[in-house]
């Protein structure tokens, strides 16, 4: 079954891409995902300041700069993985380094 991990964190303290690549915890997580053969893709998102939000209400399109919600924690990236079941997905999410500094929201994908 496919799952998306929404990787959430306070982006004011987020590491750079170079720091992530050099971090042994991220290397171990990536190795475990590869070992399981479960990676279907993923991406790190640019900061929320680069976001644009679109809403349509009563036929009127409203475009605003910034995120859809005012909150400290933001979705900073996604991982898409193939797992046997929810328990397997939760176990893998618990290994993600951001699980100990932010949170990982696990969602099954409609197929």
Image (spheres, helix red, strand yellow):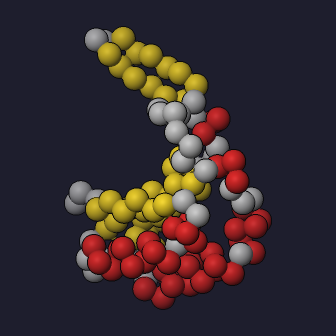
Quick one: 8 or 1, which is closer to the camera?
A: 8
Q: Position of residue 80 (x, y in %)?
A: 42, 65
Q: Position of residue 85 (x, y in %)?
A: 26, 76
Q: Position of residue 17 (x, y in %)?
A: 72, 61
Check the picture and name the quadrant holding the N terminus.
bottom left
Residue depicted at x 55% and y 69%? 100
**Horizontal side, residue 48 vs residue 13: left or right:** left
Is residue 110 shown above or below 25?
above
**Horizontal side, residue 90 vs residue 17: left or right:** left
Residue depicted at x 51% and y 85%? 32
Check the picture and name the quadrant holding the C terminus.
bottom left
Residue depicted at x 50% and y 78%? 95
Seen as rendered, the residue at the extreme bottom is 35
Q: Position of residue 72 (x, y in %)?
A: 56, 43
Which quadrant of the view contains residue 54?
top left
Residue depicted at x 36% and y 62%? 106
Residue 73 visible in the snapshot: yes
Q: In this figure, what is the number of numbered marks?
A: 0
Quick one: 70 or 55, which is closer to the camera?
A: 70
Residue 77 visible in the snapshot: no
Which quadrant of the view contains residue 15?
bottom right
**Horizontal side, residue 36 vs residue 72: left or right:** left
């Amino acid at each position: 079954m496919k799952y998306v991990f929404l990787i959430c964190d306070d982006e004011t303290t987020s590491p750079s891409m170079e720091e992530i690549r050099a971090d042994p915890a991220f290397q171990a997580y990536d190795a475990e995902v590869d070992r399981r053969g479960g990676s279907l893709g993923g991406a790190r998102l640019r900061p929320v300041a680069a976001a644009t939000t679109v809403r349509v209400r009563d036929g009127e399109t409203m475009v605003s700069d910034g995120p859809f919600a005012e909150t400290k924690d933001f979705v900073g990236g996604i991982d898409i993985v193939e797992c046997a079941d929810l328990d397997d997905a939760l176990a893998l999410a618990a290994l993600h380094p951001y699980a100990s500094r932010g949170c990982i929201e696990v969602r099954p994908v409609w197929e």
